[in-house]
Amino acid sequence: MEDLWNGLIDASQQFVIPDWDALIALLPVFLAIPVVLYLAWLVIRFANAGPTRRGKRRIPPTAPAGIHMPGPSFAPVLGAIGAFFLVFGVIAGGLWLLIGGVILAITLLYWGRESLREYDHIPSRDGQTAVVGMLQAPAGTVPEGVHLPPPSFRPILIAISFTMLVAGLIVGGWALFLGFIALVITLLGWLWDARKEYQAVEAADRTGHLDMGGSPAWPKATFAALALLVAVAVVFSSGILPNSAGEAAIPSGAPGEEPPGAGAAPSVDAPGLPEADAVVTAKDINWVETAVTVPGGAAFTIAFDNQDTVPHDIVIKDAGGATLFQGEVVTGPDVVVYDVPAIPAGSYTFFCSIHPNMTGTVTAQ
């Protein structure tokens, strides 16, 4: 119970003593809230749209002649679950990435098998026997009472924005933030199209005429916005601009003079820090030292200097994803010394469990 309370206090410190970098990182969550609320409101409207009962019993819907309506399916839900585990595996890494890929493959195979089985059982026009080969398209116009939505670029745009989001999860920083923005823009556009189409269907119920809208125009503005977001993400994530990749500002000095310590490994006896085998510094939600060297096969110490006002910790994992060490959470500015048990010689990954985008390499030798 005490650990839970301490965790709540550490989380609330991000708002009591705000760190703007951390708050900006939460913007995608704040943007997702109205989207989720709108989707919930849309589901409620569709659930209550039109009469669902006539008289005392429910009348099952009947598809017009020559039209095959597939039955309900859990395949899209399972596919979404598989995609979720794959994205989670991209973030967590290690064995989780393999598990996520296997789950997504299983759900997609289930979806494909269900689609083939449904196709094999589509009834023909002349009877109830299964159709062999390609179905002939209905001659003439769409049957009365059937609404076919016009073609749309939205699925392609969603796929592009989701690719940007997954790339942001890997790169982190500005790329992750702009990936969320791209996904929000394309989802809002899709919702806007769905709303216009639904309004057209409601109008057709009154007038008997449904305007399909013809072929869609190329979404040049959306493509341009996505291209701009990609360009901004590349610029800010590459470190071309000062401090764009989270590195510390260059201290002042004589013209042409290299900053102290530039190009050299951080000293373990840095002024003001306790004596330790290695030093790791957290600043601007990033590691200052992304590669440290420690003794192999023997216990060692890490002087952890948290210069941020948000909580951080250090977790060391091996190549298989097993946790070898997890230090206590430190809310800065503060310095602690971690006593780390012996680990075999080799290369390991260390990161912050609260900010998984903060990663580095530990070499034991």
Image (cartoon, rainbow, N blue to C red):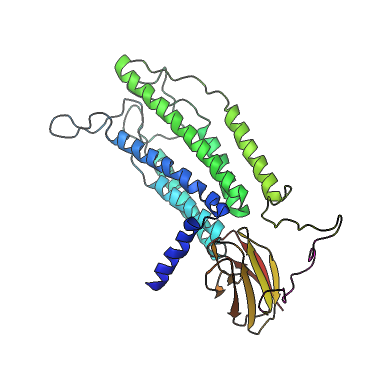
Position of 231 relative to 91 (above/below): above
Which residue shows up at 64% across the image and 81% down it? 300
**What stretch of residues is rendered in magenta?**
258-274
Report if residue 135 is visible in the image: no
In the image, farthest residue toward the left: 56
Name the quadrant of the C terminus. bottom right
Which residue shows up at 66% across the image and 42% down it? 232
Name the quadrant of the N terminus. bottom left
Judged left or right of residue 205, residue 93 is: right
Residue 207 lies in the magenta stretch: no
**Considering depth in this image, is 310 or 224 the residue closer to the camera?**
310
Which residue shows up at 67% across the image and 75% down it? 273
Judged left or right of residue 26, residue 55 is: left
In the image, farthest residue toward the right: 256
Measured from the top left, where is residue 9 in percent x and y? 44, 64
Q: Image quarter for residue 66? A: top left
Q: Image quarter for residue 12? A: bottom left
Report if residue 287 is visible in the image: yes
Position of 201 relative to 31 (above/below): above
Measured from the top left, where is residue 84 in percent x and y? 47, 52
Which residue shows up at 55% across the image and 58% down it? 91
**Considering depth in this image, is 20 or 224 the residue closer to the camera?**
20
Q: Main secondary structure of the magenta part?
A: loop
Image mark count:
0
Residue 266 lies in the magenta stretch: yes
Judged left or right of residue 65, residue 302 is: right
Measured from the top left, where is residue 152 in percent x and y? 50, 29
Measured from the top left, where is residue 341 in percent x and y? 59, 82
